[in-house]
């Protein structure tokens, strides 16, 4: 019985992990990015960097998604 419950739990966890992508978490309006699907990011991981030349930013305009890939 324990083995069956463990198997079911593992299957459910795999299904949950496969749905747990950035697509459900990051809204994005950059329509010409390859990762943009219906105004949401579908990339597996995201890299955002400061555009100030330093590792700090003070406003969002000083940040940039460097995962962007033109279609
Ligand atoms: S990679 Fe960056 S620019 Fe492209 S959809 Fe994701 S958040 Fe938007």
Image (spheres, helix red, strand yellow):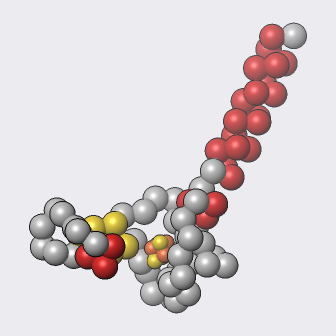
- Residue at far top of view: 1
Q: Which residue is drawn at 68% across and 52% down?
A: 19
Quarter holding the N terminus is top right
Q: Is residue 24 above or below residue 32?
A: above
The residue closer to the viewer here, 45 or 40, is 40
Query: How many labels sit on residues?
Result: 0
The residue closer to the viewer here, 56 or 42, is 56
Describe residue 1's horizontal placement relative to residue 11 as left or right: right
Residue 8 position within the rendered picture, expressed as x and y whole percent measured from the top left: 81, 28
Q: In this view, does 48 lie above or below 38?
A: above
Q: Residue at x 36, y 64 (%)?
A: 47
The residue closer to the viewer here, 13 or 48, is 48
Quarter occupied by residue 62: bottom left
Quarter occupied by residue 4: top right
Residue 50 position within the rendered picture, expressed as x and y whole percent measured from the top left: 23, 69
Residue 6 position within the rendered picture, expressed as x and y whole percent measured from the top left: 76, 20
Q: Can residue 66 be seen in this view?
A: no
Residue 29 position within the rendered picture, expressed as x and y whole percent measured from the top left: 54, 82
Describe residue 55's horizontal placement relative to residue 19 as left or right: left
Q: Residue at x 67, y 78 (%)?
A: 38
- Residue at far left of view: 54
Q: Is residue 14 visible?
A: yes
Describe residue 27's horizontal placement relative to residue 7 as left or right: left
Q: Is residue 3 above or below residue 70?
A: above
Quarter occupied by residue 59: bottom left
Q: Residue at x 34, y 66 (%)?
A: 48
Describe residue 58's horizontal placement relative to residue 66 as left or right: left
């Amino acid at each position: 019985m324990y083995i069956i419950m463990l198997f079911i739990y593992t299957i459910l966890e795999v299904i949950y992990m496969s749905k747990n992508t950035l697509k459900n978490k990051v809204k994005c309006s950059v329509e010409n990015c390859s990762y943009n699907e219906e105004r949401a990011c579908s990339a597996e991981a995201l890299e955002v960097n400061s555009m100030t030349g330093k590792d700090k930013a003070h406003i969002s305009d000083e940040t940039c998604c460097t995962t962007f890939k033109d279609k």
